[in-house]
Image (cartoon, grey):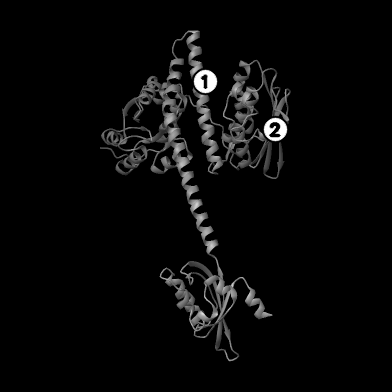
Amino acid sequence: MLSMVARHANDSIFLSDKDRRIFWVNDSFTRITGYTLEEAMGRTPAELFNSPNTDVRTIEAIQARIEAFEAARGEILNVTKDGREIWIETNIVPVHSDDGDIEMFVAIERDITATKKHAEELAIARQKAEEGSRTKSAFLATMSHEIRTPMNGVIGMAELIGESALNAEQSQYVKTIRNSADSLLKIIDDILDFSKLDAGKLEIDPVDFAPGPCILDVIDLLRQKASAKDLYLDTNFNTRLPAWLRGDDGRLRQILINLIGNAIKFTKTGGVTVDVSHQKTGRKFKLSIDVRDTGIGIAKDQLGHVFDHFSQADAATTREFGGTGLGLSISRLLARQMGGEIKVHSVEGEGSTFTLIVEMEAAQEHVPVAKDDEAIETPENLLGLRVLLAEDNATNRMLVERLLAKYQIELEAVSNGVDAVQAVGRREFDVVLMDMSMPRMDGIAATRKIREQFGQGPQIVALTANAFSSDKAACLAAGMDDFLSKPVRRAELVSALLRARKRLDEQPVTRKFG
């Protein structure tokens, strides 16, 4: 029976004496290697199967085990009778006599060529996928930069024009420019967020925050949008929320802006109601927010697709209301990363209810103190601040100069990183507004040079169209102190300068200049 099993096994089996000379083989040995028993008898496996491409270290490792009278396992490249190279998984076991001597060796070998080839193909496919992912990320980063740079000029200049004396018609034109630019920026941000979420690279950043004010801030932000369409926007807190929770308040705002913004967008009469409640289990809090509207609703056969990427109910909806179809997809992915979910109930023609559930933790022991609003419109807060602007785009240089004109700031501008480093060496600056992408020397390299040559030196704030979190990390790692993503508003820019002045006042350092 054992002989029959050996003869009919799929694996190659052969027996060799203590000198490793073959004296018996099964049928699979002949099928795999091409050698008959008569051709193999009296010869060693090395004489039959080794080729110039066989790994010497593998042979030596197997030989060492055999010489120690121990079982040997391994994968080795062999050559068949007809010259084909095949990968073999071998298992060689010594058979001992009663007095402990080696009587023979039993070798069981399996052809794993197909498995090896498949593994190589998978490795190549994985490498190509990684290269494709890197290429996509590089493309998105480039597009983000190339689009955000002119967008910074469009939005910034529209903001400046809006502050000038305009008649009603001109004000409407400027408002249209701003709204159109904001819509385009929202599309860019959606695509970037979706790409990062799809690649699993968008991280949740938990902080201690007040959930009630966070939700009310979103409501206040969107109330004007609802009023413009003569819609009501009501909020009901059905349970008394904790004063402080720990979670990503920025992502919560993003989800709520998407859900409530969509509800307003798809509602023509009536309005939107936001119901808020929570449940507590230990130190965990489950926050539940229902967004109910009296809008157009969603057809039953479309309900299963509202969270699909680039999807809206139908083409007519897209034409009438616009949008990328990414908002709900991004919101659900974010909610899931926050330990929650988004569900929808809708009746076509009667309205929809989107329910957001997210999981939060109790706030830390030391509850943060609410910050007073900084008086960003008070010129004396920035009086005499010495600022260097490193920016290669002439429009953006002019924009920053106009945005800061009323603050009595000493502003000097250069167009590349080399000039920025030289300017810091020539004069003592409090703050450098540093673009990342510039000719001759980029902002990252310029920052490193400044830190190497002048010590702590000025506060360096990235002012860049590169909006990825990896870009922010790279800026901070190079020695920058803050990060602003274009397009930048006056309030954001002034707040960054105030933060820089505060850091300078609180942490005086010995600076090396000239």
Quadrant of the drawing holding the C terminus: top left
Residue labelled with disc 2: 303
Frontmost residue, 75 versus 419: 75
Left or right: residue 128 compared with residue 400? right
Residue labelled with disc 1: 179
Residue 207 percent location from the top left of the image = 57, 39
Left or right: residue 408 compared with residue 208? left
The residue under the point 54% across, 43% down is 199
Frontmost residue, 468 versus 91: 91
Left or right: residue 54 compared with residue 423? right
Callout 2 crowding tier (Cα within 10 Å): few <14, some 14–19, many ≥20: some
Q: Earlier in the sequence, mark 1 or mark 2?
A: 1
The residue under the point 61% across, 70% down is 10
The residue under the point 65% across, 15% down is 230
Image-quadrant location for residue 354: top right
Q: Is 7 situated above or below 297? A: below
Q: Is residue 240 visible?
A: no
Circle 2: residue type: Leu
Q: Is 455 situated above or below 33? A: above
